[in-house]
Image: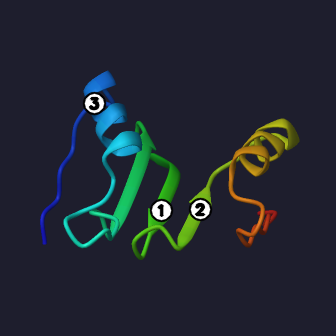
Amino acid sequence: MKVFTGEITEEFVIELIHNPFDEEDKIKWFSIFFMDEDKYVFSAEHYGCEFAAECSTKKEVECIHSIIPKDFHFDVYDR
């Protein structure tokens, strides 16, 4: 397993958005985690079929829901 850590740069964002697939047209990354300090704010796992995000407001939830595919299963859990 390879683990990479670092800052979210413009180059990283371009790679993540515009070049996510390998030679077999599969998502390159099994898991992606974004953190703010020591708090996870987003994860996509199992090659993109599982998604989790820490949202603190209804507006954040609505924003995420507005950009994901319409057939994507979307649940919101209160803590």
Callout 2–callout 1 Cβ contact below 8 Å = yes
Mark 3 Cα shell of 10 Å, populated few (<14), some (14-19), many (≥20):
few
Q: Which residue is mark 3?
A: 7
CA–CA distance between discs 2 and 1? Answer: 6 Å
Mark 2 Cα shell of 10 Å, populated few (<14), some (14-19), many (≥20):
some
Q: Label 3's element?
A: loop
**Amino acid on which disc 1 is placed:** Ala
- Is 57 displayed left or right of 36 in the figure? right
CA–CA distance between discs 3 and 2? Answer: 20 Å
Can residue 38 be seen in the rendering of this structure?
no
Residue 21: image x %, image y %? 30, 59
Callout 1–callout 3 Cβ contact below 8 Å = no
CA–CA distance between discs 1 and 3? Answer: 18 Å
Identify whether 4 is placed above or below 24. above
The circle on residue 44 is 1
The circle on residue 52 is 2
**Amino acid on which disc 3 is placed:** Glu
Query: Which of disc 1 and disc 2 is earlier in sequence?
Result: 1
- Is 2 displayed left or right of 15 in the figure? left
Q: Quadrant of residue 13?
A: top left
User: Going by the picture, which residue comes out furthest to the left?
Assistant: 2
Q: Label 1's element?
A: strand
**Amino acid on which disc 2 is placed:** Ala
Looking at the image, is mark 1 or mark 3 nearer the viewer? 1
